[in-house]
Image: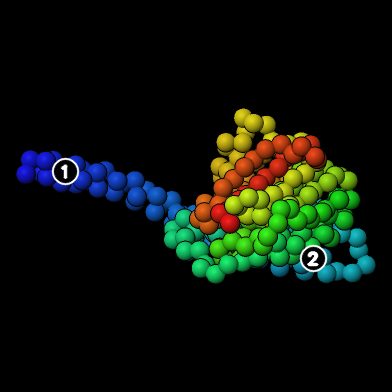
Amino acid sequence: MLLLAIFLASLLIGLRSAKPIELARRRQLEFTADASHELRTPLSVIEAELSLARSYEGEPEPVALHRIGREGERLKRIVEDMLWLARFDAAPPPPAAGPIDLAAIAKGCVERFRALADTRSLDLTLEQIGAGPATITAPAEWVDRLAAVLVDNACKYAGEAGRVRTEVGRVGQRVVLAVEDSGPGIPPAERELLFDRFRRGTNQAGGHGLGLSIADSIVRTTGGRWRVDASTGLGGARMEVSWPG
């Protein structure tokens, strides 16, 4: 009886201690979601006004308008990513039960980034590795977003006329998706902090530090495993995710 009483008392104390922490977490999630929703309205107004200003023909676009448009798009992406993370943290839906073809998703993602790669003179390639079908159990839209984050980051850091290589396939008992680039790479000391929110792998402009946080949420929820290393072939970073095959 004494042991039972001690156990129940400890449980009660633990629940009472955890309550303020859970309340603070929920308030933070609600604030993030509310702030993101509030930001969407002025962003929509700015986007509409900018579109109207750009519609006047016969005049070259002022540099200021170009900068406003570029930063507006960046801010819009930040808000959308904050909303996604807030919804995911509040109640992440369970992974889909059906198998998906990881190779098909990777191929579609690479093709979507082909035009962007051409504007930067990037050599963007896709390689099949291993043998057997590259199928995993996960929501297709999640894995597509994960692949897009990895390819987008690689394109940003590869440098002008650089190289980005995506690999997909089965290696042993695991299914692998890897993206590597010819950029500056990620120092070993930075790799443990890479998935922290609003933290970027390098000081290069262009990102906002939420993409890899979203990617990490997807990887953890779908039972995947990260491996962040240096690319032996291209010289930059290699971001690899694998799942049980």
Identity of the amino acid at label 1? Phe
Q: Which residue is mark 1?
A: 7
Q: Residues within 10 Å of mark 2 (few under 14, many from 20)?
A: few
Q: Residue at x 91, y 63 (%)?
A: 59
Nearest to the observer: residue 106 or residue 209: 106
Judge from the rendering whether residue 226 lies leftward or rightward of residue 60; answer left or right.
Answer: left
Q: Which residue is mark 2?
A: 53
Identity of the amino acid at label 2? Ala
**Mark nearer the N terminus (2 vs 1):** 1
Contact between marks 2 and 1 (CB within 8 A): the answer is: no
Give the color scheme: rainbow, by chain, secondary structure or one colour: rainbow
Mark yes or no: residue 85 visible.
no
Q: Quadrant of residue 143?
A: bottom right
Q: Secondary structure at mark 2?
A: helix
Residue lying furthest left:
1
Q: Position of residue 41 (x, y in %)?
A: 59, 65
Q: Is residue 12 above or below residue 119?
A: above
Q: Quadrant of residue 127?
A: bottom right
Q: Residue at x 56, y 42 (%)?
A: 196
Q: Residues within 10 Å of mark 1 (few under 14, many from 20)?
A: few
Q: Secondary structure at mark 1?
A: helix
Q: Residue at x 77, y 59 (%)?
A: 110
Q: Is residue 87 above or below residue 200?
A: below
Nearest to the observer: residue 186 or residue 105: 105
Mark yes or no: residue 162 visible.
yes
Mark-to-mark CA distance, 2 and 1: 68 Å
- Where is the C terminus found, in terms of image quarters? bottom right
Q: Residue at x 49, y 58 (%)?
A: 88
Q: Position of residue 212 (x, y in %)?
A: 61, 48
Judge from the rendering whether residue 186 lies leftward or rightward of residue 60; answer left or right.
Answer: left
